[in-house]
Image: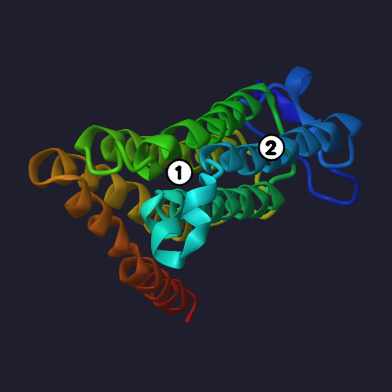
Amino acid sequence: MAEQVPSDPGSATSTHPRAHPDSYSSRSSNEFGRGISFFDAIYGFAATLLIANVDAPPAAAWTSLQALSESGVASQALGFALSFTVICVFWRVNVRLVRRLRGLDGITTGVNLVAAGLVILIAYTTQGISDPSTADLPLPTAFYAANIALVALCQTVMFELARVRGLERVPTSSRRNLLDTAGALVSPLVFLVSIPVAMTWGATAGKLTWATLLVLGPLAGILTGRAIRRGVE
């Protein structure tokens, strides 16, 4: 007999053989609220930690904008801005995905913890791509790209596991889920592709590969939205 997953008040009860009620925390429970607050704090801490990568320029650097730029602070500030934006996007994605769930169990919480740990690591890998002494080396660029790709993949895996385990608030069709997953995989795939690009043609080429997301990201969203609407009509 399939084990029953507790449902939130007012929602339909669902069952799934892989759901474990002993580790399940519904949205209305204190455990769920504490867990989400913990994850939010991690994302906030990781974003704050980025400032450690920006070194205070020497007094001589403040004599002109050119001297300030040559001190390396511009590269560090750019790295800070990039990673701060990335972490904020990951936080919003996490909020959006968890909002679609009735709760979290032990496995989905564990994967979420792995993703959160990788988010903290962004502060470390940002150092490699923003420090003037290492920014032009391919390996720091490859490490940063792998870091970002792994966070994105963990978030997708977390939701897919929650879906398989019957934790969706409003179950979606397999087709809709496939389209959503395809759209979510665009970003990590671009970062993964940038790794061999950086190792072959250099750090600048690898970083330019990331810029394709400015086009591919919105394009994937538009195509996915159209495909979903065609399926509804």
Residue, far left: 200
Look at the picture and state if 227 lies above or below 191: below
Closer to the camera: disc 1 or disc 2?
Answer: 2
* Residue 83 visible to an observer of this rendering: no
CA gap between label 1 and label 2 equals 18 Å
Residue 73 drawn at (x, y percent)? 46, 51
Task: Give residue 127's quadrant in the image.
Answer: top left
Q: Which residue is found at the position 91% from the left and 32% from the top? A: 30
- Mark 1 lies on residue: 152
* Residue 91 visible to an observer of this rendering: yes
Instruction: Label 1, secondary structure: give it.
Output: helix
Task: Give residue 211's quadrant in the image.
Answer: bottom left
Residue 17 appears left or right of 198: right
Residue 126 appears left or right of 135: right
Residue type marked 1: Ala
Look at the picture and state if 73 lies above or below 183: above
- Mark 2 lies on residue: 45
Instruction: Label 2, secondary structure: give it.
Output: helix
Q: Which residue is found at the position 40% from the left and 76% from the top? A: 222
Q: Nearer the viewer, residue 101 or 45?
A: 45
Mark 2 residue crowding within 10 angstroms, few (<14) / some (14–19) / many (20+): some
Which quadrant holds the N terminus? top right
Look at the picture and state if 31 lies above or below 126: above
Residue 185 appears left or right of 120: left
Instruction: Name which of mark 1 and mark 2 comes first in the sequence.
Output: 2
Residue type marked 2: Phe
